[in-house]
Image: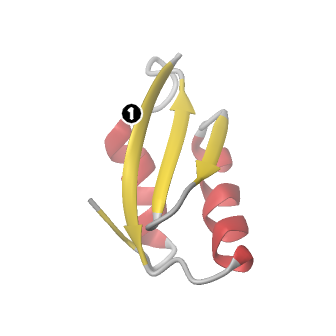
Amino acid sequence: MKNATLIVDGIHCKSCEMLIEGSLKDVGVEKVFFGKNNMVKVFFEENKVKLNKIKEAIRNEGYKVN
């Protein structure tokens, strides 16, 4: 399992986290952890989903991601 740490601008509350997590799970991310300073750590199988698809899912919800 691969992991990546992303910085996502615009996360303000638990609802934001739930929205992002749902979208990430829909594209195949297995685990999502939210940390301080808008840090989002994702765990995924690279043969199922690529990092650019993960970032795209976050952007599609209206957030900026590094």
Q: Is residue 30 above or below residue 37?
A: above
Location of residue 29 by image quarter: top right
Residue 13 image point, x, y percent: 66, 81
Q: Residue 62 sits in which quadrant?
A: bottom left
- Dot 1 alpha-carbon crowd within 10 angstroms: few under 14, some 14 to 19, many 20 or more: some
Name the one closer to the observer, 66 or 29.
66
At label 1, the amino acid type is Lys
Q: Residue at x 39, y 33 (%)?
A: 50
Residue 34 image point, x, y percent: 59, 55
Secondary element at image label 1 = loop
Residues 15 and 23: in front is 15
Q: Which residue is mark 1?
A: 50
For residue 62, side relative to residue 44 (left or right)? left
- Quadrant of the drawing holding the C terminus: bottom left
Q: Position of residue 28 (x, y in %)?
A: 61, 36
Q: Is residue 48 above or below residue 66?
A: above
Residue with the most extreme front position: 36
Q: Residue visible at 67% across and 46% down?
A: 25
Taking the spot 45% from the left edge, 81% from the top edge, the residue there is: 10
Q: Position of residue 35 (x, y in %)?
A: 55, 56
Q: Nearer the viewer, residue 27 or 38?
A: 38
Q: Is residue 17 left or right of residue 44?
A: right
